[in-house]
Image (tube, rainbow, N blue to C red):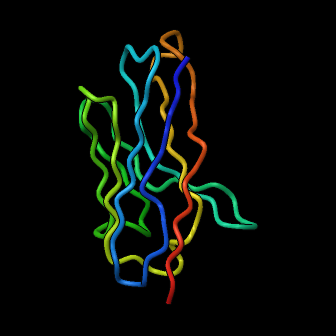
């Protein structure tokens, strides 16, 4: 079982920055992908960014050049640095951890953290 705890959300003005953190605990062995997804009211949850344990990253087009995902494998923690925030970035942001080999474990989600960007 894996438990994810997010922190760092809040209210920021457009153009500002925030850094989200997500700490994972539990049985974390094997190659995995950690990432951030977001869901705005009335919309589907969408990918923001992911990072494999080896360091390979993937970003949604809407955040490329503004957001940076990173991870500290020793601390089982993933970060999302969000710069040049826009009102459209307002969402609940969810941390995710997924094992690449299914037998190593499943797909886990955090409780979500609210990010609100005012215009």
Residue at the limit of the structure toward the right, as seen here: 42
Q: Quadrant of the N terminus?
A: top right
Disc count in the image? 0
State left or right for residue 8 relative to residue 92.
Answer: left
Residue lying at 24% horizontally and 37% vertically, measured from the top left: 55
Residue lying at 53% horizontally and 77% vertically, measured from the top left: 88
Vertical order, 45 against 71 (above or below): below
Q: In the image, residue 47 lies at what x, y percent?
A: 51, 53
State left or right for residue 7 relative to residue 114.
Answer: left
- Viewer-nearest residue: 107 or 19: 19
Residue lying at 59% horizontally and 59% vertically, measured from the top left: 92
State left or right for residue 72 relative to residue 18.
Answer: left
* Quadrant in which residue 81 is drawn: bottom left
- Viewer-nearest residue: 21 or 36: 21
- Viewer-nearest residue: 29 or 111: 111
Q: In the image, residue 14 lies at what x, y percent?
A: 42, 84
Q: In the image, residue 21 lies at what x, y percent?
A: 38, 47
Residue at the limit of the structure toward the top, as seen here: 103
Residue lying at 33% horizontally and 72% vertically, measured from the top left: 17
Q: In the image, residue 29 lies at what x, y percent?
A: 38, 14
Residue at the limit of the structure toward the bottom, as seen here: 119
């Amino acid at each position: 079982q894996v438990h994810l705890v997010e922190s760092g959300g809040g209210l920021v003005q457009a153009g500002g920055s925030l850094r989200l953190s997500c700490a994972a605990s539990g049985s974390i062995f094997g190659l995995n992908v950690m990432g951030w997804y977001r869901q705005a009211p009335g919309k589907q949850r969408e990918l923001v960014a992911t990072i494999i344990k080896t360091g390979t990253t993937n970003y949604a087009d809407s955040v490329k050049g503004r957001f940076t995902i990173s991870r500290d494998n020793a601390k089982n923690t993933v970060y999302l640095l969000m710069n040049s925030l826009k009102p459209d970035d307002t969402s609940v942001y969810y941390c995710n951890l997924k094992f690449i080999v299914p037998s190593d474990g499943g797909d886990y989600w955090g409780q979500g953290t609210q990010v609100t960007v005012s215009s």
